Amino acid sequence: DAGVIQSPRHEVTEMGQEVTLRCKPISGHDYLFWYRQTMMRGLELLIYFNNNVPIDDSGMPEDRFSAKMPNASFSTLKIQPSEPRDSAVYFCASSHRKGNPEAFFGQGTRLTVV
Amino acid sequence: GQQVMQIPQYQHVQEGEDFTTYCNSSTTLSNIQWYKQRPGGHPVFLIQLVKSGEVKKQKRLTFQFGEAKKNSSLHITATQTTDVGTYFCANAGNNRKLIWGLGTSLAVNP
């Protein structure tokens, strides 16, 4: 398995633009998590899905952030409009409901909003 | 809500010295997981502890879960430059949601 795949790896965009981050979880995993990591706030859980259904989006900072999971193999995190304070590394992770609840992380997307 | 506190925030050691990071909670934890994140990388799972007083070893790494299941530690014996990174503890709920500590960043002088 290729692991959790995120794209793009790096994104530089201007303030006010729409940004879409993409994630392909490990096949067969039924949990998908979106995290944001900054030096100031560490790892923050934004939202997570179980069987493609959003379970907890309390970590989504504002209405500018939205996430979807149209099927078991794809999820997106969208920021519209983007702001400089959204600059961070965004990680997607997946896990399986059975067995060890280890979370497998993607390589992350480094977002810079200028 | 439940929080997991991790100390120290930073640790700088000479290669060959030992290193320990601690994870504490005010409530009883069902489990504790440890992850390592290399600079520029992503968190990678190291281990999970679930039993009171549990001790597990991975080469030079020793993981402990407290008797009351409210604290945990990760000890590295004779650090190497390859140990550089940030070590996170996390508690996994039944819903697979992880509550994370802020991490301990380890720097190793060769």
Image (cartoon, grey):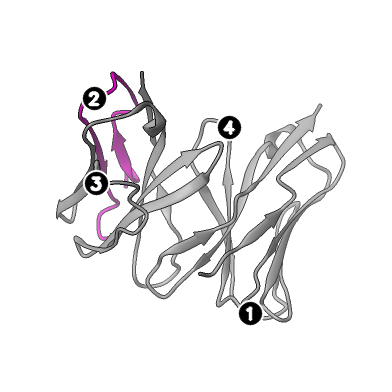
User: Left or right of B38: which side holds A60?
Assistant: left
**Nearer the observer, A94 or B56:** A94
Q: Chain of mark 3?
A: A
Q: Quadrant of the C terminus of chain B?
A: top right
CA separation, marks 3 and 2?
14 Å
Is residue A7 on the magenta stretch?
yes
CA separation, marks 1 and 4?
31 Å
Residue of label 3: A63
Identity of the residue drawn at 65% across and 69% down: B25
Identity of the residue drawn at 20% across and 29% down: A18
Question: Where does the magenta region start and end?
Answer: A1-29
Q: Can the viewer see residue B51 in this picture?
A: yes
Which mark is in front, 4 or 2?
2
Q: Would you call the spot at circle 3 few (<14 residues within 10 Å), some (14-19), or many (20 or more)?
A: few
CA separation, marks 2 and 1?
49 Å
The image shows residue B62 at horizontal and vertical percentages of 74, 60
Residue of label 2: A16
- The kind of residue on which mark 3 rests is Asp
- The kind of residue on which mark 2 rests is Gly
